[in-house]
Amino acid sequence: MPFFHDHILSIILFTPLAGMVVLLFIPGENKNAIRWWGNIVMFAGFLVSLPLVFWFGQEPAKEQLFKFTETHSWIASIGAEYHLGIDGISFLLVMLTTVLGFLAVLSSWTAVEERAKEYYSMFMLLDVGMLGVFMSLDFFLFYVFWEVMLVPMYFIIGVWGGPRKLYAAIKFFLYTLAGSVLMLLGILTLYFRYAKDTGHTTFNLLDLMSHSHAWPFAMQVWVFAAFAIGFAIKVPMFPFHTWLPDAHVEAPTAGSVILAGVLLKMGTYGFIRFSLPLLPQASADPTVVKVMVWLSIIAIIYGALVSMMQRDMKKLIAYSSVSHLGFCTLGIFALNPHGLSGSVIQQINHGISTGALFLIVGLIYERRHTREIKEFGGLSNVMPRYATLFMIVMLSSIGLPLLNGFIGEFTILQGAFEVQWQWAAWAVAGIVLGAAYMLWLYQRTMFGPCENPKNQALKDLNLREMMTLIPLIVWAFWIGIYPKPFFNVLEAPVKQIVETVNPSFGTHASAKVRLNPQPAAEPASAAPGRRVAQTASRRAGVAH
Amino acid sequence: MLDLVWLIPALPLAGFLLLALFGPRLSRRAVALVGAGVVLASAVVSWLVAYSFLTSPPPGASYTQNLWTWMDVAGFQPRMALYLDPLSLVMMLVVTSVGFLIHWYSTEFMAGDEGYSRFFAYMNIFVASMLVLILGDNLLLLYLGWEGVGLSSYLLIGFWYTDPANGRAARKAFYVTRVGDTAMSVGLFLLFTQFGTLQIQDLMRKAHDQWGMVPPGGIATAAGLLLLGGACGKSAQLPLQVWLPDAMAGPTPTSALIHAATMVTAGVYLIARTHVLFEISPTAELAVAVVGAATLIVAGFSAMTQWDIKKSLAFSTISQIGYMFLALGVGAWSAAIFHFVTHAFFKALLFLGAGIVIEACHHEHSMFKMGGLRKELPVAFWTFTIGGCSLAGLPLVTAGFYSKGLIIWSAYASKGGALGLWAAAVFGALLTSIYTFRMIFLTFFGEAKSEVVKRPGTAMKVPVMILAFFAVVAGFVETPGFLGGVRVFSDFMSQALPDAVPRGSLAMSEWGSEAVVTLVFFAGLVIAYYFFLKKPALQEFVTAPAAGRALHRFWFSDWGMDWLYDKVFVQPILWFARINKSDFIDAFYGAVAAVTRALWVILRSTQTGRVRWYAAVVVAGTVLFVALALYL
């Protein structure tokens, strides 16, 4: 048991990889064995991550706030180490990954017949990459996992995708690669600068972070820009979002679930884990904040508007993701505890809700081989169980209280309001529009008379199909009814990030946040000297 | 006994879960027993709690039951806690009692419907959410109930989902109220940012301490107006009233419970609950009064022109809630709640009566195709007439007379009152009387135009009779000074809401005001009698000229507001969404790809494989470079 406890992260990380190695020895014709093995491995991946839920609270933090850390030397010559560890933020995302990883694979039981062996092995590899990204505390290791993730996703879209799969896969690949390259430049800049300053070469994230305030502002801004483009593509933020609809539309169901549920979180996670703590002055620069926030708000509204008129259900949900992720980035750049913890919760929520939505679309696609909204209508007459589950998931997605989405959105908007009321006022438009496109989608597919003869004999969900959705729905209610444990694990890491980025915040009890009675509404063309004063007064206003 | 209060919302919630999970497998009888039974149980517990509250009042006339802490993030710690004081007690009693009567009625009304268990499941979740809204101890919990009732309203309006028109009405209700809800949520952000809590009593205390002493700034007004925005959405007040007439697409018991008696008064409750904010900011308070006064007249005109009996009642509801807003806006807090109580009785009664009539006439909604039902449906006739008289305010005997009269008087005599508001309210009373008797005359008098195919059974008759009883006697708990001066209701409410403050030097006495109200009641009755019973040709006379016809159409279409919103909001949004279906941002990336491709085509053509050509290019390049090096 101690061994298991001390190496739990490595075990979680390499369970899918070990499963994949075994899978390679199963003959390709034996599809049933492959299916069973794929599901067993992914379920085992979830099971080994489950002890974290029970241990995480009591576990003392080993390095700063990181728990369950492991360090082994790896490439000593450049200072890269095998260094894992999780804090509250990565803990939640790791759990999201193991849960969604299993459910996504479970949903592929009948959907994938062709090249099943390669399919399941790609998913296992993808799982390793995603888990690695969330666990790495070494920048080099992180980058390796980041790139590892890209390849299986490329194949999942490109091989098992829809009619335009190659277009979508290449678009996805090029977009993300462009971002990764910029990110690599950023990482190397920090690496060499740190080596120059301290005479010590390391990719250790904690070391780099401890040095973050010594970096010159101009360099921070450049590195921030490089990181931001890489992460913004992944999120995706407006205007880097156009790969997402194509990738979703062409990807197989399970691919979409993972893509929306976990892969997009890499971007937001990147902002929280790397941009903010490593580049605190750049991240808190008023101009940078303004750009990031307004891009988020544009994404919220623009994504919702484009979503509204889509004919393809998957494309509609893809654009809704752009809108929902806009809330996450808005929360991050509010740079206060409400915004940040709301953002992480909303990332989990989006994984749950949108993951479930893609599963729902996948279920109907498997039956009808189309996702055109106009092909459907009145499905609640023939598939009542499906209609009920869809309804719950839809309500969770539009942020109805008692379900998860509300908790995240409300906390984010509260955080945004505390900084500038206009941000919240604009962002709430996305909530109205969100209800508009989702309810309309539900109306057109589920309600009304069931007139299309092809729909009249559709079978309702079977047990396996229900089982792919029910865990997510239970989770959605859990966060909606009792989100306290989730916020509790986030408290310490969020506090630390806020202290790094926004040091003047929280010098007083954070509950006493006051709105500045006279917001510092100075013209944008203020002289540089005045801009500093403006920043100071804005911060002071927040912290009063 | 007070610690049973958690059961009151929990019982209907349990009913919902039971019906949602096992409903399709239960017999209809069992569904009816569960569906109506849990609400009855909830009502019984409410009365027990009320009894205990009255006989041994808790300290401070309020009781809080803490269940659990909902979330806890950086000082934001809303609890799951219930708060009982006279205001929530009265609301709770009305919701559970009237709610039970309507559930009972529904067991028969919905008997032939396929979605029997689904109907009761939705109704139960509505009652549960409404009770959470009322009993919530903090604004976030209130907001939870607020959205919950919105959802059940959406589900019930679109209950008969095979007709897309019902779905449209349901979505419209959801969208329009959500616009209000977002305003309200911004209000919550503002309040939390200011005071660091959403716990209502704390909030009110802090608001009073921090804002009450100094002259109020814009922030207090902003908070009040944002909450008013939420209230306008939920309570269908100007300018967000457009959804309620369409909401009549739902089953009639739904209209009675949600869209007349309870949910639509949530806005009234919200403003009464946060009255301190409105007392601090006279601007916000005046806005409430103006919204109320304007709505009651606008909706009164529309109610007069509808042919659909349910839509007429819907506009009447909008108008009556306008009265409640007016009362809130002039600081007559308990008068607003008093009118809420009497309105819950008589309007639920009118809807249930309308339900009997509509079922009797082959699901016909048009009053012009009814008529003469007086003899065929005596119970419906008498109860509907009692309800109508209470709505129009038949002097001395009906509840509506007392509650509306009090509001009209307060609109003049309270601190926030004014002669203009009083006149608007009196004019509204005239409209009320006209459209009410128009309904009664068209439906029950004159010649019979439709045969009666279905007569109500016991389960439909008894609830309307009980409601008719209360539509009369509920008014006697609060009477004007010259009519006995009973003050039971306002005395009880004064433990939770401040008394109305009279303003000085009045030119009119309460007696005078009530006399005018009595006068307009009879004037309306006479006008309706001549226009709709004695001389129907008069209608032609008014609507024949172009101006009359245009005005009629204008009022009929809710003052053209649907059209306006369609043109100003819906069409532009859809237009943008339509032209940008393929996301023009992608065109940029497409262009990058196209340029790359074009370069590829050009450069590829240079690779011909002919050595002479390569040599020539090399020479030309060399010459060019040398030339550049020499001359630059």
Image: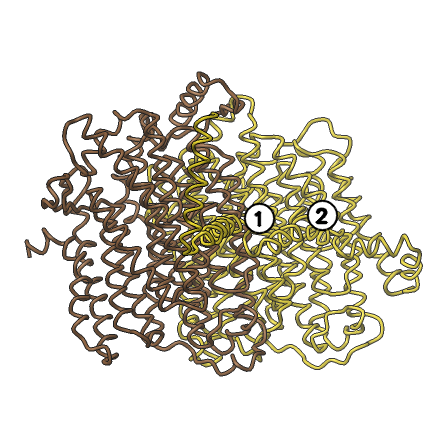
Q: How many marks?
A: 2
Apparent colour of chain A: brown
The quadrant of the image that shows the N terminus of chain B is bottom left
In this view, the residue in front, B87 or A315, is: A315
Q: Is residue B78 visible?
A: yes
The residue to which callout 1 is attached is: B179
Whether residue A137 sits left or right of residue A221 in the image: it is: left
Whether residue B340 sits left or right of residue B522 in the image: it is: left
Q: Secondary structure at mark 2?
A: helix
Residue pictured at 25% horizontal, 59% vertical: A127
How far separated are the C-alphas under marks 2 and 1? Answer: 21 Å
Q: Amino acid at mark 2?
A: Leu
Q: Is residue B83 visible?
A: no
Residue that extends furthest to the top in the rendered view of this protein: A529
Q: Is residue B465 above or below residue B616?
A: below
The yellow one among the chains is B
**Residue A263, percent across and down?**
33, 54
In this view, the residue in front, A260 or B563, is: A260
The residue to which callout 2 is attached is: B296
The chain ID associated with circle 1 is: B
